[in-house]
Amino acid sequence: MSKLRCRGLQLLVGAGLTALLVACYPHNQAPNTPSPPIGPDQAGTYSYEAYRAVSTDPDGDTIYLGFDWNDGYYYYNETTWSSATASGDTCQSCYHTWYSAGVHEVRVKAVDVHGLSSGWSAPLTVTVHSTDR
């Protein structure tokens, strides 16, 4: 169901008559900033790890969670988006393979189905150790 925000304007028409003009438009609020990512803070290179996060939307809209893995490689640094998640539910399908050793600040943000986005979460620091392949 769409939420509307309406504003009224009282106009003086003349001869003591007034008219009320009402304008309504859809109203949407951005999702709240997600909690910091939850998942392993230690990993080995080439390991496939699961991470979770939670956000809520003030309008109760369905949201998508986007993770910035901060890998250092352009291809692997692109934000990965979760499948659709109900407001307040934990994202369960956010996985990442670590390809580069080092310290990575993983953060997450939420976008609702109308395209409004939250700010970035506080980061989870992940230390990735080099492993033989």
Image (cartoon, rainbow, N blue to C red):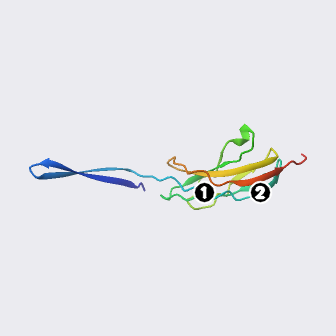
Residue placed furthest toward the left: 15
Percent across and percent down for residue 4 are: 38, 54
Kind of residue at badge 1: Pro
Please give left or right for residue 54 compared with residue 75 in the image: left
Q: How many marks?
A: 2
> Picture quarter containing residue 85?
bottom right
Please give left or right for residue 47 compared with residue 115 in the image: right
The tag earlier along the polypeptide, 1 or 2, is 1
Looking at the rendering, in which quadrant would you find the C terminus? top right
Residue visible at 52% across and 57% down in the picture: 57
- Between 91 and 36, which is closer to the camera in this rendering? 36
Q: Which residue is the site of mark 1?
A: 34
> For numbered disc 1, what is the local secondary structure?
loop
Residue placed furthest toward the right: 132
Percent across and percent down for residue 54 are: 62, 59
Percent across and percent down for residue 92 are: 67, 58
Which mark is on residue 120?
none
Q: Which residue is the site of mark 2?
A: 41
Please give left or right for residue 94 compared with residue 59 in the image: right
**In this rendering, does residue 97 appear at all?**
no
> Picture quarter containing residue 55?
bottom right
Q: Residues within 10 Å of mark 1 (few under 14, many from 20)?
A: many
Residue visible at 80% across and 47% down in the picture: 102
